[in-house]
Amino acid sequence: MNLDTLIIDAFGQWLEGEVSLERVRRIDLGEPADALWRSLAEHGFADLLLPEAQGGAAASAQTACRLLFAAGGAALPLPLASTWWVRAALAETGLPLPEGPIALATGRREGDTLVCRQVPFAASAQWLLAELPDGAWLLPLASAQRQANGVYASLAQDLSWPGLPADALRLPAGRDWRALGAAFSAALIAGAGERVLQLTLEYANTRQQFGKPIGRFQAIQQQLSVLAEEVFAARMAAQLALHGASWPASVPAAVAKARCSAAAERICAIAHGVLGAIGVTEEYDLQLYTRRLHEWRADYGSESAWQPLIGRAALDGPGNSLAFLERHLPAA
């Protein structure tokens, strides 16, 4: 058993022991996630991508992808992926590593004010890596003005600062942070989608109608087949982005996010169609995942935001479609 397998197994055990859906519900509704983050950090999962010499696991992008599948399937209410890559980037440039989870977003300046809208996982983060017009900045959330986004039980928030905080850190240029967000959001979608498939199959095989489980009706079986296709297509797309180099390239990230965002909408529609009204109730677990799928679909750009980038890369590059695939998606 190699180190990556040990990490994956250990993370699964940690999720099983610490991330109950009851706890997820409480954090979604406002309970602080500090204790959950401390547990994660104490078990060594906060520095997955750091070199071993700096106390990390030096894990591969493929291992990170597998852990994100598990995190999505557990509805983990923490900005785990962004923390991994931001801490790795800080360590690479010799900058100090802050304590606490780190969210990721793009932002803009409105006069002296810094504004970041719809920041994923902001409610459970302590820092933000903000990609601003003048570069990437690590900003403390302790001095931020927070505003809920108005979506029920969402961890996303609007953040603003009256000016650049004195303890802000500027990171060197050259990183495509939006592509990173697209890649890890795709992996979270794939993980949550797989859990939605499991819940839908369980319901279809136990819910009786006209004397037999509804999963034995041909119309339902056809919908379940499409649902399974979408889930596994999302999984393969996410693996294309988080493959090889630890930092995802823009085109594979675009392909992954476009495919996974499109899948998220279909996964939610089919699952709620099969389960009916019970699927949207607070007591049933399905809504924990489908709410996240809709949010993650939009985070860092939905399919309509990334498809033009893919098209431009294909049209501007040399050769035919096969050459495009070989150049940008060799893992396919």
Image: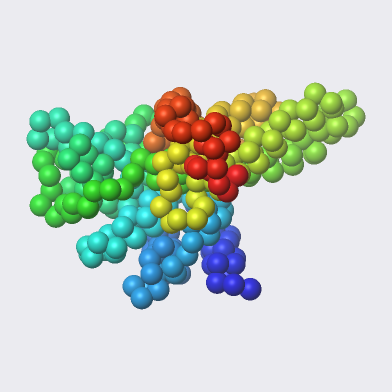
| Depth check, front residue: 199 or 57 | 57
Q: Tell me the residue at 13%/35% (across/down).
A: 113
Residue 158 position within the rendered picture, expressed as x and y whole percent measured from the top left:
28, 35
| Depth check, front residue: 57 or 172 | 172
Q: Is residue 271 visible?
A: yes
Residue 300 position within the rendered picture, expressed as x and y whole percent measured from the top left:
39, 36
Q: Is residue 78 visible?
A: no
Vertically, is 254 above or below 86? above
Q: Residue furthest bottom?
A: 53
Q: Tell me the residue at 16%/33% (across/down).
A: 109
Residue 326 position within the rendered picture, expressed as x and y whole percent measured from the top left:
55, 42
Place residue 47 in its image quadrant: bottom left
Place residue 222 in its image quadrant: top right
Q: Quadrant of the C terminus?
A: top right
Q: Is residue 229 left or right of residue 31?
A: right
Question: Which colour style is shown?
Answer: rainbow
Residue 61 position within the rendered picture, expressed as x and y whole percent measured from the top left:
48, 57
Q: Tell me the residue at 22%/52% (across/down).
A: 172
Q: Quadrant of the N terminus?
A: bottom right
Q: Tell me the residue at 80%/39% (across/down).
A: 206
Q: Residue furthest right?
A: 211
Count of number-bearing discs: 0
Vertically, is 193 above or below 102? above
| Depth check, front residue: 213 or 183 | 183
